[in-house]
Image (cartoon, rainbow, N blue to C red):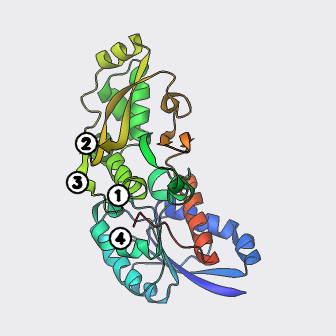
């Protein structure tokens, strides 16, 4: 039995579920010959009430990071988590992260480490619904053609409420009351969260150096009940769709409200969930759908990445 030390950056909803799931899955790690030891959980407010296993070492002092064999980051943001993670990566230690914003916007600082297999980030795009794993492995045998995806649960909820007759402002207010949307909600409804995720995916199937800045972004703020009704009359629905496809010698990457036929896989398999339709010349059309947000479903992918790490499997390697 070998001991693997683990540090956690952030302990919000996702972080709490990660800690509880690690405790629950301890027997599986033991079967792998591993005992995980959480040596620190970095937070801003140690007095905040949290639902974590007894004895969890909550702290505001990042000194424990020097002792960690694996670091898990679920704190969000861009520059602050990168400042903590950069020394970890430079010391050739693995990092598990769900942070799509950091991955999208600071790829210049992360790509080298991703190519070395140090970065694990299945949870960064569709939480517990695995798409990065397939895109970084078996799907590479098939020439990529196109993908369309719904990747933001807040926008999906708002548009669904509008289909039931609620104006945008009311649907947004309800989403905020339920905790689906932040205040302000720009990251979600403006399409930027979806754009972050699209940039991350593009590096597995289009261009390993794909830039976040090259995603054209439009949000759902201007969608009206009249737009919804017009689409319904034509047998269609409006979704905030991320699209990636070839355009000449390069790629077109766009996030925008899009009318899709009622029977489109995103509108059926993805009803109320995140969904992606992936097209390759040899593999044909593949549909991925499932929970794309939430503490437990995200934690399931993070803990899966931790398992891969302790087994010695490399992280998610982009296109060279």
Mark 2, mark 1: which one is toward the viewer? 1
Instruction: Name the residue tied to disc 3.
Output: 213
Using residue 271 as the reference point, say whether residue 209 is left or right of it: left
Count residues near mark 1 (Cα–Cα under 10 Å), then give few for <14, some for 14-19, many for 20+: some
Q: Is mark 4 on a helix, strand or loop?
A: helix
Whichever of callouts 1 and 3 sits on the residue coming sooner in the sequence is: 1
Whichever of callouts 4 and 1 sits on the residue coming sooner in the sequence is: 4
Q: What is the C-alpha distance between the residues marked 2 and 3? A: 10 Å
Q: What element carries label 2?
A: strand
User: Is there CB contact under 8 Å for labels 4 and 2?
Assistant: no
Count residues near mark 3 (Cα–Cα under 10 Å), then give few for <14, some for 14-19, many for 20+: few
Instruction: Name the residue tied to disc 1.
Output: 207
> What residue lies at 49% left-to-right and 43% top-to-bottom?
281
Whichever of callouts 4 and 2 sits on the residue coming sooner in the sequence is: 4
On the image, which quarter does residue 246 sit in?
Answer: top left
The count of marks equals 4
Q: What element carries label 3?
A: helix
User: Is there CB contact under 8 Å for labels 2 and 3?
Assistant: no
Residue 217 makes an appearance in the image:
yes
Mark 4, mark 1: which one is toward the viewer? 1
Where residue 128 sits in the image (x, y, percent)?
56, 53
Residue 61 makes an appearance in the image:
no
Instruction: Name the residue tied to disc 4.
Output: 111
Q: Nearer the viewer, residue 278 or 199?
A: 278
Q: What is the C-alpha distance between the residues marked 4 and 3? A: 16 Å
């Amino acid at each position: 039995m070998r001991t693997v030390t683990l540090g956690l950056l952030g302990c919000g909803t996702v972080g709490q579920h990660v800690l509880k799931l690690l405790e629950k899955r301890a027997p599986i790690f033991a079967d792998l010959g591993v005992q995980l030891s959480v040596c620190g959980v970095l937070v801003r407010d140690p007095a905040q009430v949290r639902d974590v296993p007894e004895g969890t070492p909550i702290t505001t002092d990042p000194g424990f990071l020097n002792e960690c064999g694996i670091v898990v980051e679920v704190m969000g943001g861009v520059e602050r988590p990168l400042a903590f993670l950069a020394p970890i990566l430079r010391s050739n230690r693995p990092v598990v992260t769900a942070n799509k914003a950091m991955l999208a916007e600071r790829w210049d600082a992360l790509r080298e480490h991703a190519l070395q297999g140090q970065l694990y980030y299945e949870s960064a795009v569709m939480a517990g619904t695995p798409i990065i794993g397939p895109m970084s492995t078996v799907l590479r045998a098939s020439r990529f053609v196109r993908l369309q995806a719904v990747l933001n649960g807040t926008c999906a909820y708002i548009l669904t409420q509008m289909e039931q007759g609620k104006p945008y402002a009311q649907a947004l207010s309800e989403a905020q009351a339920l905790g689906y949307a932040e205040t302000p909600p720009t990251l979600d409804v403006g399409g930027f969260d979806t754009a972050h995720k699209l940039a991350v995916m593009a590096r597995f199937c289009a261009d390993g150096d794909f830039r976040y800045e090259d995603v054209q972004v439009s949000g759902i703020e201007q969608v009206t009940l009249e737009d919804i009704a017009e689409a319904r009359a034509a047998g269609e629905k409006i979704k905030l769709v991320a699209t990636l496809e070839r355009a000449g010698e390069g790629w077109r990457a766009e996030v925008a409200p899009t009318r899709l036929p009622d029977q489109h896989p995103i509108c059926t398999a993805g009803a109320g969930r995140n969904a992606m339709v992936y097209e390759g010349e040899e593999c044909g059309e593949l549909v991925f759908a499932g929970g794309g947000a939430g503490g437990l479903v995200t934690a399931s992918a993070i803990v899966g990445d931790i398992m891969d790490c302790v087994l010695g499997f490399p992280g998610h390697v982009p296109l060279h």
